[in-house]
Image (cartoon, helix red, strand yellow):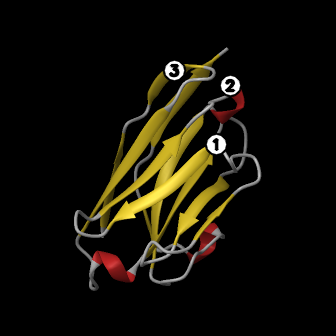
Amino acid sequence: VQLVESGGGLVQAGNSLRLSCVFSGGTYGYSDYGMGWFRQAPGKEREFVAAIDASGGDTNYADSVKGRFTISRDNAKNMVYLQMSSLKPEDTAVYYCAASEYTIVVLTAELYNYWGQGTQVTVSS
């Protein structure tokens, strides 16, 4: 499995950004994988941001992003997205896309099998 993120960049606080992640390879089809987004800020541990189940019908969010971020997926295009709105400086981090062989919503990093290389998001005040 290969995961490639895109869409990161520098934005001002209050603005929006959409991250994308394309999935390729794998023993199973893309629609058999739960997907998630994590982030890691400098000097901090990696933290869960959002997750979506294999069908796209169930999602979960970290409290810090609930109401501002939306995770979605397009199984026909092997894509997962993270729409980020009302961005804050504390959202600054490298954002990682991850795929789990569990089809349900997965919240813990240890249950993800594959990771992208990350994309930098910087929010200026």
Look at label 2 and name its amino acid: Pro
Q: Nearer the viewer, mark 3 or mark 1?
A: 1
Q: Are discs 2 and 1 less than 8 Å apart at CB?
A: no
Judge whether 67 appears above or below 51 on screen: above
Q: Residues within 10 Å of mark 2 (few under 14, many from 20)?
A: some
The kind of secondary structure element at disc 3 is strand
Q: Residue 112 location, x and y as percent?
A: 52, 72
Q: Residue 48 location, x and y as percent?
A: 65, 57
Judge whether 12 appears above or below 105 on screen: above
* Residue at the disc numbered 1: 68
* Residue at the disc numbered 3: 11
Q: Determine whether, in the image, residue 65 is placed left or right of residue 105.
A: right
Q: What residue sits 64% from the left and 42% below the top?
A: 68
Which numbered disc, 2 or 1, marks the residue that appears first in the sequence?
A: 1
Judge whether 93 appears above or below 106 on screen: above
Look at label 3 and name its amino acid: Val
Q: Residue 92 location, x and y as percent?
A: 62, 31
Q: Residues within 10 Å of mark 3 (few under 14, many from 20)?
A: some
Which numbered disc, 3 or 2, marks the residue that appears first in the sequence?
A: 3
On the rendered image, what quadrant is the C terminus found in?
A: top right
The kind of secondary structure element at disc 2 is helix
Q: Residue 106 location, x and y as percent?
A: 60, 74
Q: Determine whether, in the image, residue 46 is placed left or right of residue 6.
A: right
Q: What residue sits 59% from the left and 36% below the top?
A: 93
Picture quadrant where residue 15 is located: top right
Which numbered disc, 3 or 1, marks the residue that appears first in the sequence?
A: 3
- Distance Cα–Cα, label 3 vs label 2: 9 Å
Q: What residue sits 56% from the left and 65% below the top?
A: 51
* Residue at the disc numbered 2: 89
- Distance Cα–Cα, label 2 vs label 1: 14 Å
Look at label 1 and name its amino acid: Arg
